[in-house]
Image: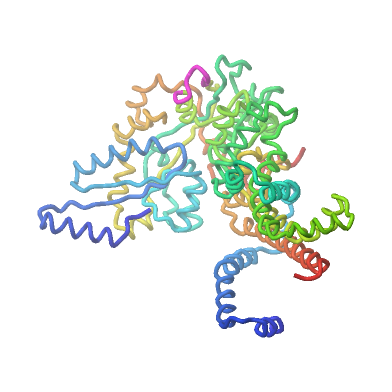
Amino acid sequence: MFLSRVLLKRHSVLPGFDLALGFALLYISLIVLIPLSAAFLKTASLSWSQFLTATATPRVLASYRLTFGASFLAAALNVVFGLVVAWVLVRYPFPGRRLVDALVDLPFALPTAVAGISLTAIYAQNGWIGQLLPFKVSYTPVGVWVALVFIGLPFVVRTLQPVLEDLNEELEEAAATLGASRWQTFARVIFPILAPTLLTGFALAFARALGEYGSVIFIAGNMPMVSEITPLLIITKLEQYDYAGATAIAVVMLVASFLILLLINLLQAWARKRQGGL
Amino acid sequence: MQVNPSLRRFLALAALTLLAGASHAKDITLLNVSYDPTRELYVDYNKAFSAYWKAKTGDVVTVKQSHGGSGKQARSVIDGLEADVVTLGLAADVDALQTKAGLIPADWQARLPHHSSPYTSTIVFLVRKGNPKGIKDWDDLAKPGVSVVTPNPKTSGGARWNYLAAWGYALRKNGNDAAKAQAFVASIYGNVPVLDSGARGSLITFTERGIGDVLISWENEALLASKELGTDKFQIVSPSVSILAEPPVSVVDKVVDKRGTRAVATAYLEYLYSPQGQEIAARNYYRPTDAKVAAKYAKAFPQLKLFNIDDVFGGWTLAQKTHFDDGGVFDKIYTKQ
């Protein structure tokens, strides 16, 4: 901390670094750390065996698998198709582009319950899409994944767009004149520049999906061991007035999410470095 | 939820100046924290009570309503929502106000007649028109090939009543053999494709999504649904035996003493037992407890054998602990397979 402070201070043109840092730390503490430490304190009231009973029963373990697995797959799909969407929106002017651009934000703005109910209706076996599909979507883990893909899309697109806009087309042209194939241009020139941003988009979509409750609850079917997400089990514990048990599960989720996000950040730093600083 | 204090002060001052002490009428607000399906009932009832109280005392009472899942509502009150009265879905949730926060005395349920339940309901089946699967009683719900919709008892008070009704039927049929009852209830839940988190969610799954052959439901919800959605689509089947669901009411002592509203809050609940209050309950599909009003509305509610939770399960606290708490019978049904 000290070292970085000295370094930053030397490079900064604007004054007021100490004050800004103080504000930043105070703000983070008030908004993030204090509520979270309350969760840890509540959990501390449990004994070790109570903690395990609350957080490691087969039913809870099944819900971790679903929540982390579906969130991961949803974020992964969004990285692929979010890149395509962002690329099209930035590179190809077409009629109605502004409209499509605005549509991308809808999953942000829509109340999650509305999203959940609409998705359930569409993918139910008597719904528009559901009746065309040979397998069930609503009320299965697949439905959970569909809802998470829906809410995660804007995170990837909105993170990528500014970077794509700054991407110099001359780089691609240079690659082409030097004899690179189209695939080589993408894999060797464009992708390395985008990789850190793709990871950021992935991390945001993934983190959002982990905590999602409102939309998933309608489409999941909530069958124990099969389609129960972890946030539902937290609510279930609260229904039994088991505040400590509920926060214990929350703490497990928090720690796991934090470790995953930290790992993504490290990956990102590594990708940046490989690219030669920035 | 409450009127802004400075606004209230301004209004009071304005009223004083205008009337110059000519009237002593008070403006009183009450907050009734209730559960989901009572929304329509209390809209009607609050109007009637305000009129009654105005005629009796001259004071103007405005009753605010808050609705949500019964357990969630109880938690809000425990966490500090200033409810003058609670009118919840099951006694366990009112008990929690006593055990978790000491807001009411332990003997709260003895303070009003009929275990503090001014109206009752029961658990019935809603089936599709013409009853294509021929569902008549609980046994039909356990048969293979029948799809049953009911919410998750872990998150829904209504779902707990559904579960206990099935369990009570099985006990009665099998000479109080708990193992057989568990197997019976397990085979019903084996037929459940979706466990929504609340009763309204299940109703939507059944009616709008077209899932399931039968919905296990509160009688009042089933009556309301079949009226709102059209009797040409759904019909109600009453099983031979079901549970007497008693949604209890209570004054929240700590709150009314602090706010000085004990008299009016108590009157609010007592008026539910009056013929007028009972009529309103009956019109909103709750079974009245008053014999005269019940006789008048006898046609609306089919006769079936009803058993009481205290007699069969030894009360809510015990039922909750045995069946629905983590590691209880309901969890075993799902984790065994």
> Residue B38 or B261: which is nearer the viewer?
B38
Q: Is residue B123 above or below residue B62?
A: above
With B329 as the anchor, is B4 left or right in this view? left
With A119 as the anchor, is B256 left or right in this view? left
Residue B257 at x, y percent in the picture:
33, 58
Tell me, yes or no, whether the highlighted magenta stretch contains residue A196. Answer: no
Q: Is residue A275 above or below residue B131?
A: below
Q: Is residue B179 visible?
A: no
- Quadrant for the C terminus of chain B, please: top right
Q: Is residue B214 visible?
A: yes
Residue B101 at x, y percent in the picture:
47, 58
With A93 as the anchor, is A274 left or right in this view? right
- Color style of the picture: rainbow
Find residue A225 and report its image quarter. Answer: top right
Find residue A144 and report its image quarter. Answer: top right
How many labels were placed on the picture? 0
Tell me, yes or no, whether the highlighted magenta stretch contains residue B230. Answer: yes
Identified at 52% across, 29% down, the residue is: B123
Magenta stretch in the rendered image: B227-236
Residue B116 at x, y percent in the picture:
40, 41
> Residue A165 or B83: which is nearer the viewer?
A165
Find residue A32 and report its image quarter. Answer: bottom right
Identified at 67% across, 55% down, the residue is: A161
Identified at 57% across, 46% down, the residue is: A112
Q: Given the current orientation, which residue lies at the most extreme front position?
A: A177
> Residue B192 or A269: which is nearer the viewer?
A269
Residue B226 at x, y percent in the picture:
48, 23
